[in-house]
Image (cartoon, coloured by chain):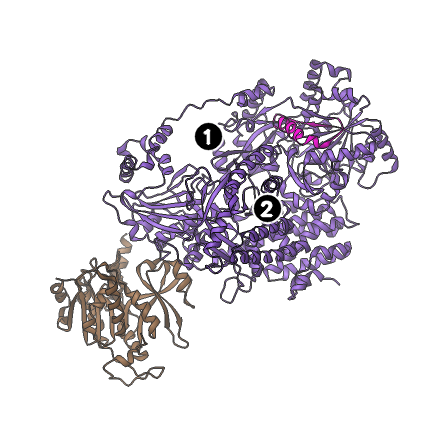
Chain colours: A brown, B purple
Amino acid sequence: MAARLLCSLSANHEDNITCPAGRPAVKIRKAVITAAGRNQRNLPLQTLVDRDGQSKSALTILLEEVLQAGIEEIGVVICPGDQGAFAAGAGPYANRVQFIEQAAPLGYGHAVACARKFTGDESFMLLVGDHLYVSKNKDSCARQLLEIASAEACAVSAVQATHESKLPYYGAVGARRLPGRAGLYQVDRVLEKPTPTVAEQKLIVPGLRAGHYLCFFGMHVLTSGIMDILQQLVATAGEAGGVHLADALIKVAESERYLACELQGRRYDIGVQYGLLTAQLALALHGKDRDEVLTLLLELLAQT
Amino acid sequence: MPGQLVQIITSPDPAVRNQSLDAFCHAATLPDLLVECAELERFRRRSENLYERVRALFFLYAIHRFHLPLKPGMGTQTLIPFNGYTHLLERRFEEAIAAFLKVQNRDGPSDPVSSALAVTYYRLAIQTLANQVRSSVRSVRGNQWMFRMGHPADHPLRIRREMLRTGEDGSYPILRERTPVRMDLTHCGWSDIFFLGMDYPEGAKVLNVSIDLGVHGRDTGTRPPVETYLRVIDEPLLRLTSVDLGATADITSLADVFDFAKDYLGLLKAAIIASGIVPPGVEGSGQSLADLLACVAGAGRGLELVSCVNGIPKGSRLAVSTNLLASMISLCMRATGQAASLQGALQEDERRLVLARAILGEWLGGSGGGWQDSGGVWPGIKLIEGVLAAEGDSEFGISRGRLMPQHRILDATEASPAARRKLQDSLVLVHGGMAQNVGPILEMVTEKYLLRSGAGWQARSGMLVILDEILSALRHEDVAALGGATTRNFSGPIQTIIPWATNLFTETIIQRVQGEFGKNFLGFWMLGGMSGGGMGFIFDAAHKVKGQTRLQELMSQTKRELEHALPFAMEPVVYDFAINEQGTWADMLHGPAALLPLGYYALIMPQLLRQEAYKLPPLRRTELDKFGAACRAKPELRGMVQTLFDRLLPRLKTDNAGEASLPALLERYGFDRTQHEQIRADLKGGRIGLAQNRLPISTQIQNVTDGDVFDATRELSKEYRDAGLAALKAGEVAVVTLAAGAGSRWTQGAGTVKALHPFCKLGGRHRTFLETHLAKSRRIGKLAGHPLAHIITTSYVSHQPTEEFLAREKFYGYDGPLFLSEGRSVGLRLIPMERDLRFMWEELPQQILDEQAQKVRDSLRHALIEWAKQAGEGSDYTDNVPLQCLHPVGHWFEIPNLLRNGTLARLLKERPHLKHLMLHNIDTVGADVDPATLGLHLKLGGCLSFEVITRRIEDRGGGLARVNGKARLVEGLAMPREEDEFALSYYNSNTCWIDVEKMLAAFQLTRADLADANKVTDAVRTLALKLPTYVTLKDVKKRWGHGQEDIFPVAQFEKLWTDMTALPEINCQYIAVPRLRGQQLKDQSHLDGWLRDGSAAYVESLCEWK
């Protein structure tokens, strides 16, 4: 497949930002959030207290992050029968969300492929429903990624340098730094949950600390080309399923300009043990109730 | 011009760089060489290039070992500083060199200090290379993380989900890997040694074939000999089982995973570690194995690893153990997602990683061969070549080549199916049965490569030409040409580089096959490090079947002839083989088919059946059910019931060996039960032991003075020679060769007869020690005008084999009186005391080994101490073949035996003018009845004249000393302090001239008394009581399984002839003789230096061969 640059496929050109390579900047309007994992379908519905002190579902917090970043349309991929619960979980944003059912659990790649009709031939942002993000600067993580993807006019995956002991939980990329572009990498290869044995051979990135690799942040901007690739993978796998997004991203890396970027922020996987607690603490410590929560933590520590 | 050797090392011009050191040194004077040494020393310290440093170190070694000692002006009596020796033992090489150089600078160059410097430079060179390999192994990408991981919580590996999918009965599937072994089609000149490949990648080339095997006549066909199995179990532990070694263990602690020598499961443990399941980084972390396994396989779960090599004997030279290790590593990597391919073949990058991990695993286990050994992982026939290091490689800038070679699998144009078939139809693979230690060979090859001796370097270049010939023969499907090339390789380059690659056994078989098959025998092909184990014989295809049959017979016959001369681990076997075109291959076994190898059940089931069913974990009960069902349904398991019955109800161990049984042997050899029980009681009671061997600490040990020793290191005057010659002509002299010992150190306790060992090619063919000694006597006999009488003392272990061997060899054509003096004393070995083992290993100075090898040795020693405690310290050692349970009781008894068994009386009858005996050790090959030395003995007029030599660092075990003011020989065992020995200039050669009359007087006997057996026995007993009895620990081999050998330390006692010098009533004299005359060959690893330093040529000059 010939390289299909995001710029040429994007339907809307609202900004006049110019890409570094002379490509026109693009506007990304749509986001897909996957929440159909059979073991994680309730995670986005968990309630947390957001940075503003309001109790919200994790899904709502995620939707706010995405909408505030400039996304206009959101598709949430869910299990059949979950729409009612997720509509309730979406709170005030329920009307801006389109729910897409994944009929059979055939893998994460299949879940993304289910949103093909929703994304059409536009580039889109992809997020996982069981992650929350806390930015270290004024712009949310979603906004940071969108700005980079708009400016670079290509597929971009957010990544985070991750210790090798966490490799069993994430996809990872092998990449080269873009000269003069801090935190930006040209992706050469993608591996899903690699062992460190493989990672050491194939995913070494100059400049990272020993034993650290660029692992996915749970947030990507992808071109519509990925849907074609996923479609082929789904067709090949058939009922056996097991379609991984990473397999499609490998082909993206081979056929398109595909970047990875380190964002100023952190991801929190609420699906792991104590993940919800950690995410809650992170939100609280970055929000208006920071002092109160710190006091509570200190008291707790003093009593134990 | 000074610094010429440095120029040879650093020159970019290969013609200069490949110059031979020997050529330069032969022409240089002593001062020239000392200047060059000083420059090399400065150079090796400042150079940052690994190979420049190492080559400089080898140059320094060779100059001090081979060249300086030959130069006029070298001192001989300088003392080696004890502190330098201590540094050397503790591997503080730089400090040792500094200590030795300080003495050299102070006292001038000398033979003793050069010997110390030589060994230190050598070990430092080997250590430097080993460090580099270790560093390279650790820095191979894919291996690095395993050394970073230190806590189970950080474990990044997870067992694949497929391994956790249980069947209907709840059992987990089994992942099975089947791996061929490899044979080296070219013999690569050992160019796959890491050091060599990393310095000379252009010359590191091997044609390596993956093969399936079957034992001819035993197995129904060929199959991949290595099978390994892995499954998840419902217990939080590692269950390791080696079917072939009959060993199984449940490992529950991390410390036990790293305890390699605790049991026979070291290789399995190395695989678990090298595959990253238990990464090397967690060693010593104190963490829980269960926690680590929970991380990898899930809470409460563990892993079971089973290995099996289908009865292929050890020492096959087909790299069975390395391929077994590689197979297990591959299996574990597949199961934990480190290889994409769970089943089927591996991808090329995965194979390369398995190779890197196997190198790591071998290093962890304290061993290591070459990089071609994991060749079975690859399919078919492949050319493996060294690769120049390039930017980005961890070796770049350090060594010229990479640690890891590249593999190119030959396609049909390079080796057509017809060529492969022809090869299979013509080649007979065998295992000759010999037990060999190839470790020293690898070091020799490295040394010789770096020294670039002229012939050796030409041979190495010639091998590359032969490789091309073999490739061409394969391309042209010409097996005859291939056979011709491998034969030339064996007889030419291989033996030029390493003469010890061949031996009498191999050459005899080649000769017999050649004689029998004539032109239908197309060639011989050596496998691996040495011949005698795995070998190949190439026949015309029409004669292969006959070749297989006859080879089996010829090898068995030759083994029978030589089994007392050379160490054999097993009966020779002939293999069937087929080229394996798959390489290593894995499949998953599910449900009823998920069975482990049959040998596993024969090993495990008796243990399970002895337990109450309710105590067994659920999966063990399931296993019982599944195996029971399989036994009922599968025809191939029909014999299993009987096997299990025999295991559950073992037969009473009956002693049906008849005369060969231990009690019968003890009876036959006059075992003194009363004396034995006294010794045992004394040993157990702590009255005797290693510590008690020593003289009291208050004993004053001083070096002898000039007046104590007569210097015969230079040519003696004619007067002595004439006197000696006259005595010879008058028939006053006979030779006594001490040949009763088992030569424990020579073969690590193999129980062969050292006297019969064909140790070296002299005069164009292999010669035994005995033949060599007789050849010297033949020459002296001619000088004397009549044949010299020669006595060979024997013992229970050596008498019959020597008698038969000599008869078969027609007494080597010796035409003089030749007597065998049969031993009359025998001891029964004892399980050692923990106290003595600890004294030997913890109190006495020990050579520390390289880091990982030392760990393995410590682990082994701990296991041996546990063995001694469990077997019963101080109890009789009977758990071996009877002959290995007995021991000779020391060479002191061999002279009294001459009196007791009538040999001396017979000799005196035949040679009534006999007045003197020259007694010498079997391994003092330079000793002869030199007329001048004999004349000196006559002149000195003592009862005993002992020959001594100046000391080198390897001469350990006492020496000539003034003990409390009186000159005498002191055994190393008796030295009050270790450092005392380093104050002594002379070492005992154990060659002793005996005045017969005076000796008889010392026993309070006359010639006439020799006819009175009782009087002689009483006299011997009386004198024996005056001499100390030493307790010693000796290695003894126990053979079992298919070529397996264990070495145990056992306690025995001995009395030594040298202690006669302590008796005040005996007039002893001491003669300092040239080193070439007095040095002993104690260890086979010394042979190469002995051959190169002029010693062998000296011995040849003394011999007259029949």
Q: Are marks 1 and 2 in contact (CB under 8 Å)?
A: no
Q: Position of residue B882 (x, y in %)?
A: 54, 26
N-term mark: 1 or 2: 2
The residue beneath circle 1 is B870
Q: Is residue B877 above or below residue B401?
A: above
**Any magenta on residue B794?**
yes
Res B892 quadrant in image: top right
Amino acid type at circle 2 is: Lys
Residue nearest the observer in this picture, B229 or B984 = B229
* B585 vs B446, nearest the viewer: B585
Out of B1006 and B106, give the one closest to the viewer.
B1006
Query: In the image, residue A232 lies at what x, y percent?
Result: 26, 67
Q: Which residues are magenta?
A: B789-817
Farthest residue to the front: give it. Answer: B542
B507 within the magenta span: no
- Residue that appears at 67% across and 30% down: B806
Q: Chain of mark 1?
A: B
Residue annotated with mark 2? B519
Task: Pinpoint residue B929: horizontal percent, then vertical percent.
Answer: 78, 33
Give residue A34's quadrant in the image.
Answer: bottom left
The reply, left or right, for residue B844 in relation to residue B170 is right
In the picture, residue B618 is in which quadrant? Answer: top left
**Disc 2 crowd, CA 10 A, few/some/many (<14, 14-19, 20+):** few
Task: Name the disc covering residue A230, or none.
Answer: none
Point out the image quarter for the C terminus of chain B. Answer: top right
Pick whichever, B727 or A137, lies toward us. Answer: B727
Tag nearer the camera, 1 or 2:
2
Chain where mark 2 sits? B
| Badge 1 density bin: few <14, some 14–19, many ≥20, Cα 10 Å | few
